[in-house]
Image (spheres, rainbow, N blue to C red):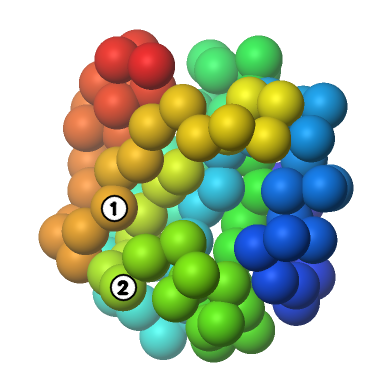
């Protein structure tokens, strides 16, 4: 999974303007993030129409604030620079919950 370098929202939207992406907001210290990480390769394979990109919350704290991401792990889907949907909260997420979110888009 690609890792997003530090950037602001304007730069991010330019970078993903012609792509279908799933941003995965996480941090190394987050136990709930570590819980879902082993399932991510399976999720990525199953939903290969998305480019999955890891966003380190600590490296991109300003971007998280701009996108109203205050809990992790969280997911935001974009297509052609437009937000398709978000699964953003501070709760632990299971593989089934993440897949149900993606299916709902």
Q: Quadrant of the C terminus?
A: top left
Q: Residue at x 37, y 65 (%)?
A: 68
Residue 5 found in image quarter? bottom right
Q: As drawn, is 103 to the left or to the right of 82? A: left
Q: Which residue is mark 1?
A: 88
On the image, the x and y values in percent for residue 84 come to: 46, 27
Q: Residue at x 50, y 70 (%)?
A: 66
Mark 1 Cα-neighbour bin, 10 Å: few <14, some 14–19, many ≥20: some
- Picture layout, residue 71 above or below residue 19: below
Which labelled disc corresponds to residue 3? none
Q: How many marks?
A: 2
Residue 26 vs residue 14, the one in the foreground: 14
Q: Residue at x 77, y 40 (%)?
A: 16
Q: As drawn, is 10 to the left or to the right of 15? A: left
Q: As drawn, is 91 to the left or to the right of 3? A: left
On the image, the x and y values in percent for residue 71 come to: 28, 69
On the image, the x and y values in percent for residue 91 come to: 15, 60
Q: Residue at x 23, y 41 (%)?
A: 94
Q: Which residue is mark 2?
A: 70
Gap between marks 2 and 1, in whole Å?
Answer: 8 Å
Q: Are marks 2 and 1 in contact (CB under 8 Å)?
A: yes
Instruction: In the displayed orientation, state which residue is furthest to the left.
Output: 91
């Amino acid at each position: 999974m690609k890792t997003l370098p530090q950037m602001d929202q304007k730069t991010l939207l330019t970078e993903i303007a012609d792509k279908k992406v799933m941003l995965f907001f996480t941090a190394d210290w987050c136990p709930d993030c570590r819980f879902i990480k082993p399932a991510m390769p399976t999720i990525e394979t199953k939903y290969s129409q998305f480019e999955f990109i890891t966003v380190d919350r600590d490296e991109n704290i300003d971007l998280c604030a701009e996108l109203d991401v205050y809990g992790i792990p969280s997911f935001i889907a974009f297509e052609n620079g437009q937000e398709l949907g978000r699964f953003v909260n501070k709760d632990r997420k299971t593989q089934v919950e993440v897949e149900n979110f993606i299916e709902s888009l």
